[in-house]
Amino acid sequence: MYQELTDHFEVKSDIDRTWEFFSNAANLPLITPPWLKFTIAMNALPRIEQETVLDYTIRWCGLPIRWQTRIIDFTPKRQFIDLQTKGPYALWHHQHTFEPSDNGVICFDRVFYQLPVPGIRRIVHATIVRKQLTEIFRFRRRVIGEHLGWVRALQDDIRIEPLN
């Protein structure tokens, strides 16, 4: 089963500063909770742009997991999409969208994902992954707000819904 995760919030920043923050790969460890031990596994940090490939590792339940994503859509100051090409998910498609507002910038995250291993993915999602992704994105929202200036949440919490 596919899942959709969304987060929708507003930051008190202009579009240039917001775009610079999100399109800088050096900020990825900053917006990832420390318990994941996120490490960029590249000699040099590439600029996030169309077709950029990012290699990194995380630790999940103590195990190192290699993860690779590729930027499949890049529309400066509006959106970019990263797609997992290697990693723990059967699918991980993360859309980041930005829209200037009267108070700053509206940020919208939309992730379509699916766990591997069909026979157990439903129970693993319900017992572990759903909670961890909610915690990860709450952490991410808080850190982004601290760096860009928090305005308000545009949805009450991180939402995760099954897709049929």
Image (cartoon, rainbow, N blue to C red):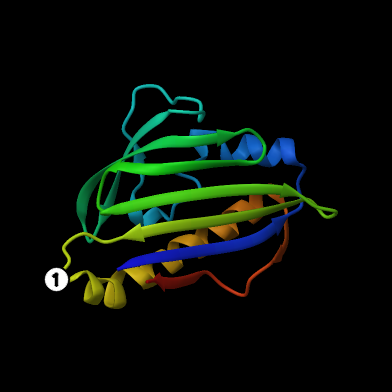
- The front one of 22 and 34 is 22
Extreme residue in the top direction? 44
160 relative to 20 in the view: left or right: left
Question: Mark 1 packing: few (<14 Cα in 10 Å), some, or many (20+)?
Answer: few
Horizontally, is 63 left or right of 147 in the view?
left
For residue 94, above or below residue 50: below
Q: Is residue 21 left or right of residue 163?
A: right
Question: Residue 8 placed where, x, y %?
Answer: 62, 62
Say what secondary structure mark 1 lies in: loop
Q: In the picture, which quadrant includes the C terminus? A: bottom left
Residue 94 position, x and y percent, is 46, 50
Image quadrant of residue 18? top right
- Is the residue 145 above or below the residue 26 in the image? below
User: Which residue type does callout 1 highlight?
Assistant: Gly
- Residue sitting at 22 percent across and 69 percent down? 121
Depth check: give the residue in front, 24 or 80. 80
Farthest-out residue, front: 164
When asked about the image quadrant of residue 35, the answer is bottom left
Q: How many marks?
A: 1
Camera-side residue of 49 and 45: 49
**Residue 109 coordinates in the image, percent (x, y):** 55, 55
Tell me the quarter of the image containing the N terminus. bottom left
Residue at 28% x, 77% y is 127
Where is 105 relative to 56, above or below? below
Q: Is residue 37 above or below residue 121?
A: above
Image location (x, y in percent) of residue 148: 69, 48
**Residue at 26% in and 61% down:** 115
Residue indicated by mark 1: 119
